[in-house]
Amino acid sequence: MQSDDIVWDTLGNKQFCSFKIKTKTQNFCRNEFNITGLCNRSSCPLANSQYATIKEEKGQCYLYMKAIERAAFPNRLWERVRLSKNYEKALEEIDENLIYWPRFIRHKCKQRFTKITQYLIRIRKLTLKRQRKLVPLSKKVERREKRREEKALIAAQLDNAIEKELLERLKKETYGDIYNFPIHAFDKALQQQEAESESDSDTERNEEKEEDSNKREFVEVDESDLSDFEDMDKLGTSSEEEEEAPSSEEEEGERNGQPKSKGKAPLKGPVRRKRPYIEIEYEQETELLSKSKAT
């Protein structure tokens, strides 16, 4: 039969234990079922036949209980009870399962459960929060990549210089009829020329549009010009009144029974307006005529 005192005498009292860690001030226990983490008689899971503890597995808390009745069956030695995720309900479940157990074990189980729930909450907050990820880089790799970048940059500059020089010689026709240039460089030059011509045509179109828009202008008119127009309007109205006067006289004669003047019948078509009557006087110089006759 198992005796807790004998087990503690062989393990705890300055004897060897694989779970024990000795320090200058205190001894600690590395057993996963230890309720406090200290190496003493009340919290040793090996020296207590009736024992309970709290463990966390993948974010879920479980209550583990060991009883003396199951000591003969190692595969059924520990009874596991899943606790609720609600903190108050989990404490009630611990009290229900450990109702007749010692007060020390019940209190330490609650204390351990609170610590586990606290660090689980901290883990959730840290996972939701953004964090910087530090990636180690060796200095040799950095130097090698830097050297490769410098070499690639020098090679690219050299290729561009050679390509520009060849294109300039091609334009100047220094080689005559020899055209052993790479096709992709020639195509690129053609594309550049097309782009330049398109840009020139666009600028010309914009200039033409600006000229068309500048053709229409708003200019001020002097008052003297307006007075001239008014005088012309007055002359036109006076001539119309003179034409209307004889027509009114003819109408009055018809009413009185006077016959109309004989003449040609008016032609059909648009009515022509009569010009105002103008008198022209001629003056002859008699003295000059008499002298010419005398000669």
Image (cartoon, rainbow, N blue to C red):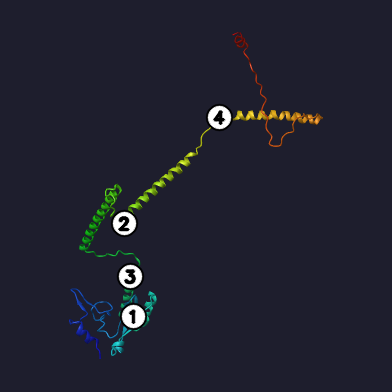
- Residue denoted by label 3: 123
For the point 55% across and 28% down, the residue is 224
For the point 73% across and 28% down, the residue is 246
Residue 206 makes an appearance in the image: yes
Say which element carries label 1.
strand
Callout in the foreground (4, 2): 2
Which of disc 2 and disc 4 is earlier in sequence? 2
Furthest residue to the right? 257
The count of marks equals: 4
Give the Cα separation between the discs numbered 4 and 2: 71 Å
- Residue denoted by label 4: 225
Left of 190 or right of it: where is 142? left
Give the Cα separation between the discs numbered 1 and 2: 79 Å
Give the Cα separation between the discs numbered 3 and 1: 21 Å
- The circle drawn on residue 63 is 1
The image quadrant of residue 277 is top right
- Which x, y percent locates residue 286? 63, 11
- Kindly check if marks 2 and 3 are in contact, taking CB atoms under 8 A apart as contact: no
- Which x, y percent locates residue 13? 19, 82
- Residue denoted by label 2: 183
Callout 3 amino acid: Ile
Which of disc 3 and disc 4 is earlier in sequence? 3
